[in-house]
Image (tube, coloured by chain):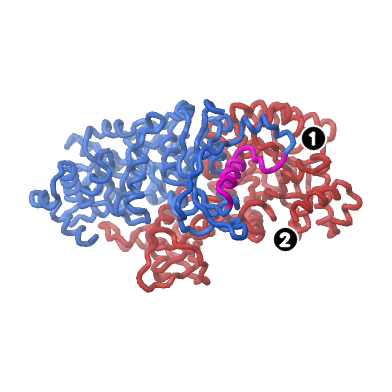
Chain colours: A blue, B red
Amino acid sequence: MSGRPEVVATYLVETYLPLEQAAATIAGEQSTGTFVAVARETAELRDRFAARVVAIEELPPTGTADLPGTIRPEGAQRRSARIRIAFGLENFGPSLPNLLAAVAGNLFEIRQVAGIRLLDLELPDAFAARYPGPRYGVTGTRQVLDRPDGVLLGTIVKPSIGLPVEELRVVVRELAEAGIDFVKDDELMGNPPHSPLADRVAVVTEELDRVAQRTGRRPMYAFNITDDLDRMAANHDLVRDAGGTCVMVCVNLVGHTGLAWLRERCELPIHGHRAMTGVYTRAPQLGIDFVAWSKLARLAGADHLHTNGFSNKFYETDDEVLRSIEAVRRPLLGGYETLPVLSSGQWAGLAPETYRRTATTDLLVLAGGGIHGHPDGAGAGVAAMRAAWDCAVSGGELEKTAREVPALARALETFGAARG
Amino acid sequence: MSGRPEVVATYLVETYLPLEQAAATIAGEQSTGTFVAVARETAELRDRFAARVVAIEELPPTGTADLPGTIRPEGAQRRSARIRIAFGLENFGPSLPNLLAAVAGNLFEIRQVAGIRLLDLELPDAFAARYPGPRYGVTGTRQVLDRPDGVLLGTIVKPSIGLPVEELRVVVRELAEAGIDFVKDDELMGNPPHSPLADRVAVVTEELDRVAQRTGRRPMYAFNITDDLDRMAANHDLVRDAGGTCVMVCVNLVGHTGLAWLRERCELPIHGHRAMTGVYTRAPQLGIDFVAWSKLARLAGADHLHTNGFSNKFYETDDEVLRSIEAVRRPLLGGYETLPVLSSGQWAGLAPETYRRTATTDLLVLAGGGIHGHPDGAGAGVAAMRAAWDCAVSGGELEKTAREVPALARALETFGAARG
């Protein structure tokens, strides 16, 4: 079997069965199903198509709750393991949805496990041949923005929903004049009756053109084109035809396959929003880890991908956020360059810690309240963020820089106190 | 606000905060986000776009584990509630992906909840105008099969994967001659290099044509067309052009949006497989309940939908299975007729209990081992299933019927013992 192209899936498994038995059940359920005697299932067929248990690494107990329906033989101990299983590529070919049928499929329903999470996927080169992946990535995004280095700074239009387009115009103008790199729609703002995408595109691109003429800098605005697929493609065309330079897609809401479909038709950078990722990641004993999830999104073509940010308002710890950022930055099949997007609770004061932990400026940092909520306005919010990042990268001290940059001093004063 | 078209989402919420506060947080996070003070968010805007807490019904404690990151104020008690929240349709319009941004979105990540599940969705009529839903449903499927009444009986081709097409021909012939209504590909069998869909379609349709000429009956064969979307559409065309009468789609693997996209182009009944649904349903403190999930799949166009079966080999209890079957059968927006598909561990002996609990024959019951594993062959397996269902519907006793139908006697003998 060596030499055949394979996908290797890594799982966190909790079970009351012997680890070898649990691993064999997973491999069987998701390939030849050797536990049911079936006519015509020859030894040769099994040799060719059976998934293979590559490694079982026992881990300390996790203490998570058993999934409903778990088989618990009397007196059996619960054990945890990282289990790696190899599936022949021949079983499904280089197709994301058909890959998922094998590595996920019915797996989350089997009673032999008290817990199961798909942690990671190693994919053979055939996937690179099928999926072109990000068209722009980090390099392309920097080129469009004419920002060859330094962290990229952005924000989300607030309020999330319901802002009249003429007020949107004012918000965008203020942000663009402040030298921001990136502005995005909220994920709640798609193409609703009260604020049609066409109206937003007209107003925003007109305003960005004007600012660009005056300042020479044109921020990227990620219009949320998420919708039913034919409409999403039409939304993309609308943005492109108006001279827009970015589209946002909620990856889970159109699916990885929907994203890959868009990629085939898309001429702009795709800003991948992670809304609903929590349904896969948050239950400790079930789901799909961000590492595996993000690989699929990158293959499907996400140029930017939300990783959450340090000190965020959601459930993830800073260590988990760092792991997600690193996962997105790690080369995949020799490429698939995607820009990590840090969001939620971000502000100037987090720059040193973020830079210390990530050791890169290949990040798009989005601050909502940290920019819109700056007491001297969004312009000061952007200036404070930029100064804080320059300081962090040059190894300076924020307090010292703040003495020279009033906007930063005000940010530290305002948000530093509020956030402890 | 009364009279505006709304979506009402029902959640199971676990929290250490006052229930009113948790409910308000959910409503705020997923609409106007009133917990962050933002310029331009006027009272008028909030009135128009804020989600509204409709009802909070406290429930007995569930005893599930807290989600990671849960906020637990000192001394606070954990409480459970069914919470209903109304979102103005104006916030997102009748779009499945944009609906999900609101009713699910970031919700699974908020720290204010120790548990959160989306249980149900009530949708306004605008969704009926946008989504045509199942083209065939129960009635259309019965018409195609020329089976105006009685339960519909089917099976899955086994082995799941790797069967050479000439052996597939033999299996299909045997099943069709035995009078089966329905045969399907395994969800692991898409369009892999070792068994191209085109080859399977050619062989299976040829064989079904021959049997139909001899017997006058042509079973439906659900070819698994799941793939990247453009390929899925091409797969559909291939099946249609060859005279095939059904396609199978793994709903989660192409997404509800992918399914809705296919529906626009699809001329055949869509057999909706639920592979990977467990990732949404199995963690008791997180996810999306089958009731909500199945409504989205029906809107998106699933003519048949897997509900799992009684005494199945997976984690769900019989009560949960019954709830899923009833959910699929309940009219949605006055229509969206979808056929429940019972699968996993099904065999003749389960007919009386299944009929007693569901009180309907508008079911497609799939038996894998229960047909292929019959000691006298698949033909006897089908005969046993048919006799058992006739007996169940007429209120007879299986043991009595078995005295007249040797195939049923053998099934009871073989599977009854094995399954206790």
- At 51% across and 34% down in the image, what residue appears? A7
Q: Say if mark 1 contacts mark 2, CB within 8 Å.
A: no
Disc 1: which residue: B174
Residue A332: quarter of image:
top left
Whether residue A302 is situated above or below residue B120 in the rendered picture:
above
Q: Nearer the viewer, residue B255 or B371?
A: B371
* Left or right: B257 as drawn, with respect to A139: right
- At 67% across and 50% down in the image, what residue appears? B340
Q: Could you tell me which chain the residue with mark 1 belongs to?
A: B
What is the quadrant of the C terminus of chain B in the image? bottom right
Whether residue B106 is situated above or below residue B72 in the rendered picture:
above
The magenta stretch spans which residues?
A17-37
Q: Which of B297 and A51 is in front in this view?
A: A51
Disc 1/disc 2 C-alpha distance (Å): 31 Å
> Counting residues from the N terminus, which is met first, the one under dot 1 or under dot 2?
1
Residue A213: quarter of image:
top left
Q: Which mark is residue B357?
A: 2
Q: Disc 2 on helix, strand or loop?
A: helix
Kind of residue sitting beneath label 2? Arg
Whether residue A137 is situated above or below residue B313 in the rendered picture:
above
